[in-house]
Amino acid sequence: MDRILLNSMHHTVEAEHRSGDRQGCLRGTRRDVLLQLEDWLENEQNQRVFWLNGLAGTGKTTIAQTFADITFAEGKLGASFFCSRDFEDRSNLHAIFPTLAFQLAYRYPQFREQLLEVLRTNPGIGRESLCSQLEKAIVGPLVATDISTLIIIDALDECKDDEPASAILSMLSRYVAQIPKGKFFITGRPEPRIRSGFRLESLQPLTEVFRLHDVERSSVDGDIKLFFRTRLAEIAKTRSDYDLTQDWPSPSDVDVLCDKAAGFFIYASTVVKFVASENTTPTEQLDQIISLPNSTADEGRSGIDLLYTRVLEQAVGGVNADNKKVHSRFRTTVGAVVLLLNPLSVRALSDLLKVSTISTTLLPIASARLLFFPDLIKSSTKSRTLSIFFSV
């Protein structure tokens, strides 16, 4: 009966760190920030909150995933919520605290008993105000049990929030000092409402801030070079259909790729996926990226725009441009996928566009899925590239 009551509480199943297929940091990379996180977690000083602040593409979620994996294995992680603007239940502010409470209940039996007492008298707590959720479902049980735990909230900026200062941070500012042994690790871009939230008078003194975009470029470049060497070497080993010598990629090629990445891990990740695309030659794929100009300032585009455009051009090459009907259907379908505020199923998209061949139409861009699927459509540069590409 207790388990039924607990499971009936409003929560998001797919938000925790073990859900989905997010990848952590490559072993040997991001050591500086991971060591700082470890020091913060073990430190008994007053910083109860850690804000990993970074621009789009700098690797915040990858670091959060790695930190979650490490602390979970060590028995220190109590709960995690990985926000995403592309999923309704993961961009809903009112889903965060109930989900964290739900996970804490399954992680700690003593917490579960406290939460069940709350649910017996108020089974609808998961749909109440943020203040009520935090106070009754998290703060109360943690204070009563004196549990030492870590809570992770990733990509807070991707939640829908109309408040001038983040509503979640505003709530934390009221209660975090009351939790004797709880710590919160939060990642998010430095958007105005996130910055305003962390500047709240009662939260700022309790927060440690790490700015990823301020990390020494030499350190980031070293990590990106290791990423390229490791991942491209893996491609060479797995592609038995091509004779890739031990000198591929060459050190000079890795240097060029690192220079083009300009400190953005999202660029490096996208290049590797592009090179690894099925039904293509890895060496030719890599040469395409190497040959791209480093700067297109006169055209108003950045280097990463060129990369995304090249991926799209190769994908659309599979569409018969001579067949105007097919080409028009392709542009209509992919354009809708790009512009949708929330993802639709294939059937719903078919009904919306009055097109019965959605799956067939999207087949040519299977190798370019990184551009269209929710975990990657986040940065303004992608949006600009796509708008250029699909403009009439």
Image (cartoon, rainbow, N blue to C red):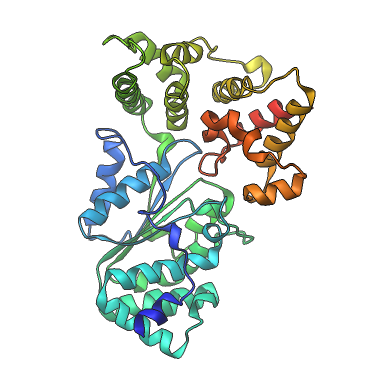
Q: Looking at the picture, does residue 147 appear above or below residue 306?
A: below
Nearer to me, 374 or 104: 374
Residue 167 sits in quarter: bottom right
Q: Looking at the picture, does residue 291 appear above or below residue 388?
A: above
**Residue located at (51% from left, 82% from top):** 124
**Residue located at (30% from left, 48% from top):** 67
Q: Position of residue 40 (x, y in %)?
A: 27, 52
Residue 333 sits in quarter: top right
**Residue located at (36% from left, 85% from top):** 1
Q: Where is residue 77 in the image (x, y as percent from the top left)?
A: 28, 60
275 vs 218, left or right, is right
Residue 48 sits in quarter: bottom left
Q: Position of residue 36 (x, y in %)?
A: 27, 45
Q: How many labels does the image show?
A: 0
Q: Looking at the picture, does residue 368 appear above or below residue 103?
A: above
Res. 242 visible in picture: yes
70 vs 151, left or right, is left
Nearer to me, 378 or 167: 378
The C terminus, quarter of image? top right
Res. 195 visible in picture: no
**Residue located at (69% from left, 20% from top):** 320
Q: Position of residue 336 (x, y in %)?
A: 71, 41
Nearer to me, 93 or 188: 93
